Amino acid sequence: MNALFARHALLPEGWHGDVLIEWDGRGNLTKVEAHARPPIGVARADYVVPGMVNLHSHAFQRALGGLTEQAGDGPDSFWTWRDLMYRFGASITPEQLEAIATQLFSECLRHGYTALCEFHYIHRDPAGKAYARPAEMAERVVAAGQQSGIGLTMLPVLYSHSGFGAQPLKPEQGRFRSDVDSVLGIVEALAPLRGGQLEVGAAPHSLRAAGIEQIRELAASLPAGRPLHIHIAEQQGEVRQSPEFSSRRPVEYLFDAIAVDARWCLVHATHLNEAEVAQLAASGAVAGLCPTTEANLGDGLFPLSDYLAAGGRWGIGSDSHVSQSPVEELRWLEYGQRLVGQRRNIVASPARRHVGENLWQDALSGGAQASGRPVGALAPGRRADLLVLDSTHPNLEGALETDVLGRLVFCGNDNPVRDVLAGGRWVVQGGRHMAQEAIARRYREAINQLREVRA
Ligand code: ZN
């Protein structure tokens, strides 16, 4: 029977006791009933929360984690990091990408992400030629999703220029080359694979790499309701350059030219002025915050307090994958704001006092919207994506319902995610992914091959 009985479960409106959760063979929740009686023969759990949505990922960068932490000759920045990342991406084969992505997704699942949005821009072969099947690389990431069991939103990326003003691509960007037609071609090639565990949207890379006319055309041509993501205002350099070409700041420019609405996810949006904060919040779009990557790259801090006060929606992503844990993203998000504001308990209000729970629920809601999939809540009709926490872990000993997520997000570095159900399948049990050894073996092979290429 596809069912679980939770002594305590986090539902959209808060914690409830004695919750009977049932799902069908397609991985959709069919029943979520609080104050139920435990049926005979149904598995039981103490603390159950919805699986988290990871709204921003470049899967291949998982293999680069920890390799860019040596100082160069001059001051290091996002841009010097990007050169290293390009060199690394230059030789990755389709097989290696699949192995790296499968490892990453299995790690994400073990830490509590059950859905992920892949911002996918390595389209072409190392010589810059289209593969015989132009969707080859995207299909490899989709295959990794299927092997790991994570739910995916694939976002093929529009990448035509190396900078504002339609500057030509640099040689090291040849693998990313795409135009509106080629992106729509990938969207169409993946259409037969869409289903419960896969949605397909699109992503103009940034205002640097895609022209505003192209973005408009892509948004108009993509089937209605599909998600659209874009990197924006991540770096001061971009904010400084934008007015030279558009006489506006990046977010201002996007909003003037495009009808940004709830289909959109603006990734990073780190550098916003007051008017842009209000504009983004009012649009219904999601701000895609990636705190560990933004810290690693020295991007800056998103103005979260002002954005929350304006009613803005947000979610989290692991982006470059220096971390695969939603706990770390949420903790850094809150801590960054505490450090800069010199006060505590930022994502909270008198009506919502529990910071860990607010962080989890808000990130679920924004992440689900950005994914374009019915995820992010334990409710009938949503995907059966949930986490069973290890109630025997000392950090959770004797926890009241309202303390559970505070303890999870703000205490220690152990991973108390015990079992993970994704799309109605138990993919992690007892802290182990169902294919952990085989996936890790393929990952090690891919890494060793890449090391030989780089040596
Ligand atoms: Zn990114």
Image (cartoon, rainbow, N blue to C red):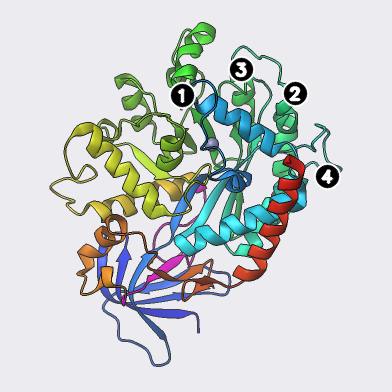
Residue plotted at (52% across, 48% down)? 372
* Cβ atoms under marks 1 and 3 closer than 8 Å: no
Rendering quarter of residue 58: top right
Asked if residue 309 lies left or right of residue 322, the reply is left
Q: Amino acid at mark 3?
A: Gly
Give neighbour class at mark 3: few <14, some 14-19, many 20+ (Cα, 10 Å). some
Which of discs 3 and 2 lies nearer the camera? The answer is 2
Is 224 colored magenta in this rendering? no
* Image position of 339 with respect to 113: above or below: above
Name the spot of residue 273 as percent of width and height, x first: 33, 20
Question: Label 2 vs label 1: CA separation?
Answer: 23 Å
Give neighbour class at mark 1: few <14, some 14-19, many 20+ (Cα, 10 Å). many
Q: Which residue is mark 3?
A: 163
Question: Label 1 vs label 3: CA separation?
Answer: 13 Å
Residue range in magenta is: 371-392
* Cβ atoms under marks 3 and 2 closer than 8 Å: no
Question: Label 1 vs label 4: CA separation?
Answer: 35 Å
Asked if residue 153 lies left or right of residue 375, the reply is right
Instruction: Answer whether residue 241 is visible to the viewer in this image.
Output: yes
Give SS at disc 2.
helix
Instruction: Answer whether residue 382 is visible to the viewer in this image.
Output: no
Q: Which mark is first along the chain, 1 or 2?
A: 2
